[in-house]
Amino acid sequence: MNAETISQLYRERFSDRSLIVVSNREPYIHRKTKQGIKIDTPAGGLTSALDPVMRAIGGTWIAWGSGSADKESSDDDGKIRVPPENPAYTLKRVWLDPKEVDGFYYGYANQALWPLCHMLIEKARFRMRHWQRYFEVNRKFADAIIPEIANKKDVIWIQDYHFTVLPYMLRTRSKDLTVAMFWHIPWPPWEIFRVIPQRIEILKGMLGCDLIGFHINRYCQNFLECVENELGTEVNRENNTILYEGRDTRLVPLPISIDYNKFDEMTRHDKIQAKLSDIKQKLKLEGKYVGIGVDRLDYSKGIAERIRAIKLFLKKYPEYCGRFTFIQIAVPSRTKIQEYSELKEQIEKMIDEINEEYGTDDWTPIIYHAANIPHHDLVNYYRVADMAIVSSIVDGMNLVAKEYIASQVDEKGVLILSEFVGAVAELSNAIIINPFDIEHFAEMIRKGIEMPEAEKKRRMQKMRAYVQTHNIFDWINDNLNAVQQETL
Ligand code: GDG
């Protein structure tokens, strides 16, 4: 499936039904700079995955207008056509004041739901004022969505944990709407979920949907278990449905993916060789075995565990000192939350220590880059790297693993992958690690480096073939099929 086929299929199946995507993060952010207005694409899995889909299908994407120049770049309704270079869909921005951002985004979404769903109970903070703002912002989004519905059959597709109560709010305004949701992070087992004081409101809110997509079936099963225990509702485990207040909600496992062709093509660009030489020269990588990690700087991504494993690897195998360089690209994220600013300090300290202990005048073991790099530059780093390490301690799916695979046009790269990411079920040809087992992890780094070329190639070919045929357009097709089945 590719951009053209999905756009054609959408028109055939949903001719008079528009697509309205709703997310917290917007795909394009206008920012004031000294040189004028700059447009950023945020680092993050959701926007990277959905922008190609919206480019292909068109429609409206409703999101929080978070950029300092967003207002002046949008019309009176907060709307602007994007992508800026080749407009294909409408972005409608919702304006939030600082208190709303604080309570809704930094508060309930990212200090309560995010850690809890990643099963890190001790990091979760539940504050009533955060919940109240979260609830109010969900209502504000409902108010922004309603005027965009031209036809009752339009597909409203809500993204993620920022909007658990929004589906029910929409449902109370009109019973016939088509409301689907995709949950991008893990759904925890009931024993963990039950910690949330607002758990009943959350479940009832989400059951306003006709359909809820999760990356893998285990998250669907966890959700069913929560509904059963909290609402006392009967669930059908055979077809993953819940009958609640006279309506059905169906859960579907739909592993998200990437725009494979885009990465593959970017990596085959004619100027790529010159770019790779530049990077190698600038970072002194010539003759080195290069590893890479690319993450939003988040405690779920297992960056500290990765650094520990690299340190142990260099200690156990000193013959690789001077010969192995690791590039860590870590885009700062949610830095207003103390937990995240502390993590940033911790990671930087760990990297400084290892560089101090092992580095020499002409070799830095870990090169750290803490900035947002656009995808067309990021692929050069993926391509330069002989190995990628994805070591999340919990991760809904993880797109970096798939992006790395799509960028390995010469089929030589090795992927080290945590067994705790959603993607592991699909990428069994990676070298699988447990990020908490540092000794084994260090050993697997060595195994990856020393693996015979033919085996590297065999594994990478299989993973590339899989991601190519299970790309973001296949994912959207599966989502649309499920929506169609539920709502026709
Ligand atoms: C959530 C779930 C799930 C990274 N650095 C830069 C940059 N990135 C991009 C990557 C990739 C994305 O950010 C990160 O995707 P992930 O999947 O790792 O993670 P989350 O942001 O945590 O996303 C996750 C995802 O939703 C989708 O459902 O897979 O499990 O946690 O695309 O390339 N992008 C840019 N500059 C960077 O420096 N522009």
Image (cartoon, rainbow, N blue to C red):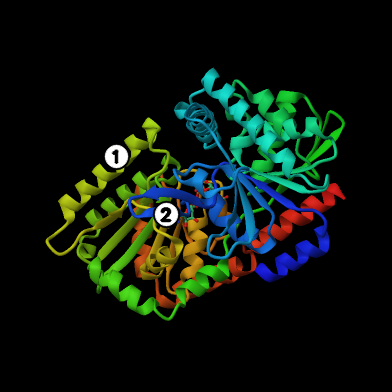
Q: Say if 44 sits above or below 449 in the image.
A: above
Three-letter residue code for mark 1: Gln
Q: As rendered, which of 74 and 41 lies closer to the eye?
A: 74
Q: Nearer the viewer, mark 1 or mark 2?
A: 2
The residue under label 2 is: 38
Identified at 53% across, 74% down, the residue is 461
**Marker count (numbered):** 2
Q: As rendered, which of 255 and 84 lies closer to the eye?
A: 84
Q: Is residue 313 visible?
A: no
Q: Residue furthest left?
A: 361
Q: Say if 116 sits above or below 456 in the image.
A: above
- Say which mark, if any, is on residue 95: none
- Say which mark, if any, is on residue 346: 1
How far apart are the alpha carbons under marks 1 and 2?
31 Å
Q: Is residue 173 visible?
A: yes
Question: The N terminus lies in which quarter of the figure?
Answer: bottom right
Residue 14: give x, y in percent of width and height. 81, 58
| In-image side of 164 versus 324 (left or right) | right
| In-image side of 44 versus 150 (left or right) | left
